[in-house]
Image (cartoon, grey):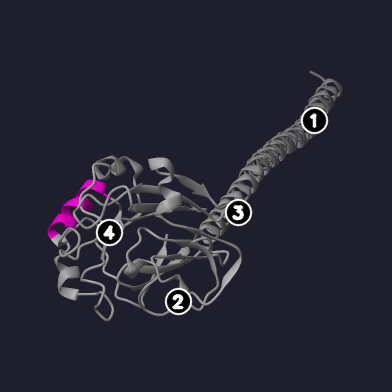
Amino acid sequence: MTDKEIGMTGRKVKTGKMIKTVLLSVMTVMMLALVSCGKSGNESIGDKNQRTEAETKAGTETETEASSDEGNSDDSDSIEKEQTEAEPSTQQEGLNEQEKSEEQIEQEQQEDSEMSKAATLMYQGHASMRITTYDGNVIYIDPFMGTGYDKAADLILITHGHYDHTQTDLIENKNEGCQTITWKEALKDGEHQSFDLGFVSVEAVEAGYNKNHNVKECVGYILTFENGITLYVSGDTSTTPQMSELADRNLDYAFFCCDGVYNMDVNEASECAKLVNAKHSIPYHMIPGNNSNGFDIDVAESFDAPGRIIIAPGEELVLE
């Protein structure tokens, strides 16, 4: 090979190496570029993924908050609804309590009104008593003994004609229209009479049935007051056939004579009280009328009857 050829061959080799080096450099640059692009692309995708995750998370939180707000709103609406529903109930309960209170007040006022209508009985002694109704009308029964005759009379009741039951002169005054009812008016034509005076109704009943008291000339009385309270006074008597019938009347108060001299004694009077069966039974006319007050505590305490009340002369009893 000639030197020329050798020289050309060397240049070719050198040139080839250079080309190879250039190619390698280009490839290296390209690879670096590709790596750089790949890295940049990966970071971009990662960022996108992070943004997507963040947005998703943010969206989820937003939805959760919205859901929570909606739930809170529902709860608030529910609470408000319950409160709204509860308010009428509470108001109704308040009205019911108010109505109940008004009913109680009305009932108490009615009871007070009934109490104010109660009559008051003053036992004067022996068979004598004075009754004052709630509106001030005054009734005397068998005036004879004790004090308290200063009130003007509106009605005087006499059970029979013996002196220890007929002392009407003791009554200081009589109101205009005062009526006196004796056994004569009460037993008209042999029939027991009834009288309605407005402030009290009076019914004559049997009395007598012993040697000292003729049933045709003696009566007892049942008084009924405006508030419905009833009072029976036996008058001078022994046991009468009518007493057993009086049990059906459900009487409130009943007075029984029990002197044991002119009338039945305390034992018989106790049996009569059981026959009549009033709510309250009271002994009176305990000893003959010449005694200072006609009262004997021993006799009174011997009186054995349901609902017994003992009243001493001068004491008062509210008929309620």
Query: To which residue does mark 4 refer?
Result: 236
Identify the residue at horizontal 29%, vertical 57% (top origin): 280
Span of residues in magenta:
267-277
Secondary structure, mark 1, is helix
**Residue type of the residue flagged with mark 1:** Met
> Which residue is disc 3 drawn over?
102
> Marks 2 and 3: which is nearer the front?
2
Residue 247 locus on image (x, y percent): 28, 43
Q: Of callouts 2 and 3, which one flags the residue occurring earlier in the amino acid sequence? A: 3
Q: Kindly identify the amino acid type of the residue bearing the numbered disc 4.
A: Asp
Along the line of sight, the residue nearer the viewer: 32 or 113? 113
Mark linked to residue 30 = 1
In the shown orientation, is residue 310 left or right of residue 109?
Answer: left
Name the residue beneath numbered marker 2: 170
Q: Earlier in the sequence, mark 1 or mark 3?
A: 1
Which secondary structure lies at badge 3? helix
The three-letter code of the residue at mark 2 reads Leu
